[in-house]
Image (cartoon, rainbow, N blue to C red):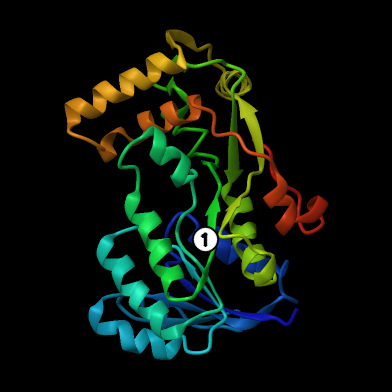
Amino acid sequence: MSPVSIAIIGLHGSLGQPITDVINSGLFDDKVKFPIKALTRKDDIPSNDKFQYIKTEINSESVDYIASELSGIDVIVELVPARPDLIATLEKVAEKVKPKLYIPSQFGCDLDKVGKIIPGFAPGKIQHSDNLRSFGIKTVDIVTNFFAQPNSFMYTIVQHLGVDPQANTVVQMGPVETKIPYTTVEDIAKSVIAVATTPIEKLPNKLKIKSDSITYREFIEKYELNNNVKLTIKESLTVEEANKKLEEKMKQSGGFNYQDLLFYLHVAGANDLEYDDKDSQLINPNESIWKWQKY
């Protein structure tokens, strides 16, 4: 497969720096056509042999300019927040550019599955991918389930696993042996470039990758060890009780409420979000490109 040209939109979010680090590491140098084009609003970032920075806003007035700058690009990687105005603009850009592959900012849970548990969970993201595919563009959603990142998700942000880090308590939902897939941000970054450089005919519309899976029991034990604390069980709920609590909370709030996101994710995890590693094997066969990190 010939090296592919890549454009990245949104390098300043949680995945921006990890992806920059992966590109600078040289791990995929023989598969990428440099420089990578990167859209930015900042005007003080000099381009180099790896990155060509394109200063621009992303709005209706910049569609033609962005499309002309990205003309002929093979892959567009989108890392921006799922704001309706941004998404609408980027769909117009994609329709003009017609890349061979588009990777939207879908990282996280399997939206189709979680949407059946939590009504109204990120419907805009699903529609975004559908819109891109309607243009005839190969669009691959990358499911990672829970992020894992020191000083952040699964380390200090742990409420979606039932832990209250201030009170050192835990709410258990469902069996403690239920497995939770997770992916470290470093592995997500490597996976994005791996997907971008995989022959398109090998890619499904949805890839479910993971660094590994961990049970709630294993997570609690590791959290206690890492933080030198002992968690007290505040409440134990069956999956059915957790779902009932979700239903009541959503009724009180009038539907999906972003402020309750971590609670939603906890309930979703209790409903079993586990999946196998066949897609991880597809992009990184037998860890031949890199070793998946463990929590």
Q: Nearer the viewer, residue 200 or 44?
A: 200
**x and y, in percent, of residue 264 in the image:** 37, 31
Q: Is residue 41 something that shows in the picture?
A: no
Relative to residue 143, is residue 43 drawn left or right? left
Query: Compared to 278, does 1 lie above or below?
Result: below
In x, y percent, where is residue 154? 52, 34
Q: Quadrant of residue 272?
A: top right
Question: Is residue 193 found left or right of 91 in the rendered image?
Answer: right
- On the image, numbered disc 1 is attached to which residue? 17
Residue at figure coordinates x 75%, y 78% from the top left = 1
The kind of residue tagged 1 is: Gln
Task: Give whichever of 289, 1 is nearer the camera.
Answer: 1
Query: Tag 1: Cα neighbours inside 10 Å, few (<14), some, or many (≥20)?
Result: some
Task: Measuring from the top left, give residue 4's x and y in whole percent.
Answer: 65, 80
Residue drawn at 59 percent across, 45 percent down: 184
State which quarter of the image contains the C terminus: top right
x and y percentages locating residue 95 in the rendered image: 40, 80
Q: Is residue 183 above or below residue 206?
A: above
Examine the rendered structure and indicate whether residue 147 appears above or below residue 200: above
| Numbered disc 1: secondary structure | helix
- In the shown orientation, is residue 1 left or right of residue 249? right
